[in-house]
Image: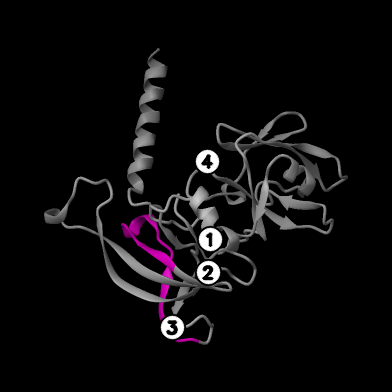
Amino acid sequence: MLYKIVFGLICLFLANTAFSENPCNVMIPRGGDGDWGIGCYLIPDEFRIKVYDDADGSIFGELFTKSSHIYLLDKNKNVINIEYEDIEYIGSYRNELVKIKECSNPDFVRVLWKTSKRILFLNKKNLETEGARFKKYKDIIFDKSIKEKYANYDLNIGVNVKKSCLNLRMDPTINAMILICIKGNDWEKGFGSGIRIKEVKGNWAKIEYFEMHSKNDAEESDDDCSYIEKNNKIGWIKAIGDDGFPNIWFSV
């Protein structure tokens, strides 16, 4: 009984901590400058599909969803922990994405390359049959209908790079003058920064960039998120890299 009480208190503490860490929905880079593949599949709440092993083309196991989370089982029904780099979300942990790469067989896509040392594949036809839908990152970021369906507009969009920064330029070309190089947010910088997309041209986006600063004690409100915008700038960023990597993404 004591164990259950202690466990419950720990869970409550962790839940409250998680919610209090990011009250203003600041976008913290999750992709770094890493490999996100060519796009992703939007996965429905009820989903189960076979996973194939490239070693001999046999069935490796299954990928399925339960309680809004994605799980991987091997053929012996052992649960394999999926690395966070292989899964992404659109604004909410209920809107699950499975990152994919192309493979030599056009009927299949590669998945879970961060999770497994083995080369794993999903069948495209099976994905469509089970209700999964392929989207390029460009489609998700720029398509208004997708954002209206999946992403809460109260959630901020931010820079999705860690190792470098993203140039804000006067015009949508790599030769245009740089106004500022926007760094990705981190937990030690307080509220950080965000962007609003104003216009789209190819892989470029015209944005309003803003810094999010905490209000002083005299200006504090009762809201969980209380900040003021400073140093707003308008310019163009290359929102999607030449390799398809999303240089900007949604907060979660």
Q: Residue 202 carries which label?
A: none
Label 2 or label 4, whichever comes before in sequence order: 4
Q: Which amino acid does label 1 sit on?
A: Ile
Q: Position of residue 213 (x, y in %)?
A: 26, 61
- Where disc 4 sits, the SS reads loop
> Mark 2 Cα within 10 Å, few/some/many (few <14, many 20+)?
many
Which residue in the structure is indicated by mark 2?
Answer: 239
Q: Nearer the viewer, residue 223 or 26?
A: 223
Q: What residue type is labelled 3?
A: Met
Which residue in the structure is indicated by mark 3?
Answer: 170
Label 3 or label 4, whichever comes before in sequence order: 4
> Mark 3 Cα within 10 Å, few/some/many (few <14, many 20+)?
some
Q: Are marks 1 and 4 in contact (CB under 8 Å)?
A: no
Membership of 195 in magenta stretch: yes
Label 2 or label 1, whichever comes before in sequence order: 1
The residue that appears at 40% across and 57% down in the rendered structure is 156
Which residue in the structure is indicated by mark 1?
Answer: 141
Asked if residue 237 lies left or right of residue 15, the reply is right
Asked if residue 55 lies left or right of residue 155, the reply is right
Q: Position of residue 34 (x, y in %)?
A: 59, 61
